[in-house]
Image (cartoon, rainbow, N blue to C red):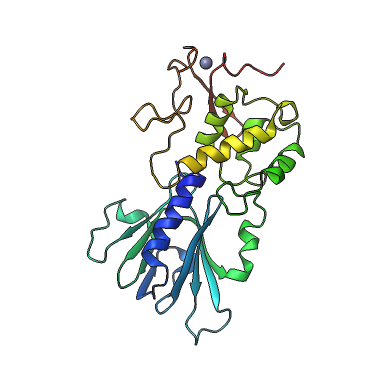
Amino acid sequence: MPEGDTVWNTARVLHRALAGARLTGSDFRVPQLATTDLTGWTVRESASRGKHLLLRLAAPADHPGAAHWTLHSHLRMDGAWRAYAPAERWSARPAHLIRVVLRAADAVAVGYHLHELALLPTAQEETLVGHLGPDLLGDDWDPEEAVRRLAAHPDATIGEALLDQRNLAGVGNLYKCEVLFLRGLSPWTPVGAVPDLAGTVTLAQKLLAANRGRWTQSTTGSLHRGQTSYVYGRRAQPCRRCGTAIRKEELGERVTYWCPRCQPAPT
Ligand SMILES: [Zn+2]
């Protein structure tokens, strides 16, 4: 599932494949960019902010308008970028899911099922990501600011508040469920009743950071299939700590997994 760590990894893959390269061709397969041609543009860098990907470009000297542009994309639940060698087969996903192809001399980047694909002047990036809370995997990660933002809405459930990217950016459903299990918190606990918000956001940051640089997401320390999570995706299976059946229910717009014994309901 694309969460902050996956997006961070994806940004690094794109950076390694394209940073410094001059594009020899582009092919946008979304209506809003159908006439855009990035041939001759140079890739400056690839970065992530929360779950947003920012591919920063320099326009050719004769391009009217801004010199620096950002190709923005969001992976949501199902998007992906892959980098291929020029002659390599694009095997990651079916071709009809391709939304953009960026070609350079040494690499081809293919974006599958991307969301919110947009090209805008880099100076306007904040219009897309300025609302985000502190980035868990950013150089400027600020746990105190994340706690401050969470605490500003004490009646929200902690399960929904951790997913709200305006509070802190990068936590998706998997890490939300796992952090709450590890802290012994019911997902329905009001933020104002969480005894140690700072400890909760610090743990979330550690879990994401531990999964940087690999594609298997594990919160248990094990990379073996079926052993990578405590509660996420484990409905009706025994809790690894107490043996109680893990439960799954809707919370807000998402499902949540939890152990009713290790994470007792708020009183
Ligand atoms: Zn349990």
Instruction: Say which residue appears at 34% left-offset and 71% top-offset.
Output: 104
Looking at this view, name the residue that lies furthest to the bottom. Answer: 62
Residue 38 at what x, y percent from top left? Answer: 43, 75
Residue 164 at what x, y percent from top left? Answer: 63, 42
Residue 241 at what x, y percent from top left? Answer: 49, 16
Instruction: Say which residue appears at 22% left-offset and 65% top-offset.
Output: 87
Quarter of the image for the N terminus: give it.
top left
Residue 36 in sight here: no
Residue 96 at what x, y percent from top left? Answer: 33, 55
Residue 10 in sight here: yes
Please say if 47 is above or below 24: above
- In the rendered structure, the answer to whether residue 75 lies left or right of residue 201 reads left
Instruction: Say which residue appears at 36% left-offset and 62% top-offset.
Output: 109
Residue nearer the viewer, 227 or 159? 227
- In the rendered structure, the answer to whether residue 94 lies left or right of residue 3 reads left
Please say if 197 is above or below 54: above
Please say if 5 is above or below 115: above
Residue nearer the viewer, 62 or 200? 200
Quarter of the image for the C terminus: give it.
top right
Q: Total of numbered circles in the picture?
A: 0
The part of the image, by quadrant, that contains residue 107 is: bottom left
Instruction: Say which residue appears at 58% left-offset and 28% top-offset.
Output: 180
Please say if 92 is above or below 237: below
The part of the image, by quadrant, that contains residue 155 is: top right
